[in-house]
Amino acid sequence: MTAVAAVAGARGERLHFERFANADAGPRDSDAGFTVVLARTGREIAVPAGQTILDALLGAGLDIDYSCMEGTCAPASPASWMARRTTATPC
């Protein structure tokens, strides 16, 4: 984005950046499996390495609303599934 701003002639005082991960974030969460706990039922769903939470929930037979496979991601936030992620645990 810095390069785009420079080409556009934007000045520093007119720019605001928000980064959601630092440059050296260490191991990615997708490098290890983890477990999510469904808030309403307490059911635990294992999410293997490389799999999304959505795929794991669907694979477990849950009937949940989602639209992220339609090209829009905002409605499919983890908060809308009423689940919380536990610490990374082997699957």
Image: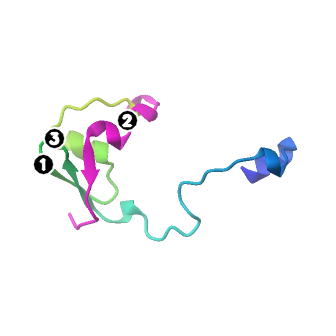
Secondary structure of the residue carrying tag 1 is: loop
The front one of 4 and 59 is 4
The front one of 39 and 59 is 39
- Tag 1: residue type? Arg
- Whether residue 40 sits left or right of residue 55 in the image: it is left
Q: Residue furthest front?
A: 13
Magenta residues? 69-91
Distance from disc 2 to disc 1, alpha carbons, whole Å, reads 20 Å
Q: How many marks?
A: 3
Q: Which residue: 24% across, 32% down?
A: 64
Q: Earlier in the sequence, mark 2 or mark 1?
A: 1
Residue 43, disc: 1
Residue 17 location in percent, x, y? Answer: 67, 50
- Tag 2: residue type? Ala
Q: Earlier in the sequence, mark 3 or mark 2?
A: 3
Residue 22, placed above or below residue 64: below
Q: Residue furthest right?
A: 9
Secondary structure of the residue carrying tag 3 is: loop
Q: Is residue 85 located in the magenta-colored stretch of the structure?
A: yes
The front one of 29 and 15 is 15
- Tag 3: residue type? Arg
According to the picture, the residue beneath numbered tag 3 turns out to be 40
* Mark 3 Cα-neighbour bin, 10 Å: few <14, some 14–19, many ≥20: few
Secondary structure of the residue carrying tag 2 is: helix
Residue 76, disc: 2
Distance from disc 3 to disc 2, alpha carbons, whole Å, reads 18 Å
- Whether residue 78 sits left or right of residue 41 in the image: it is right
Residue 27, placed above or below residue 55: below
Residue 51 location in percent, x, y? Answer: 32, 52
Residue 47 location in percent, x, y? Answer: 25, 54
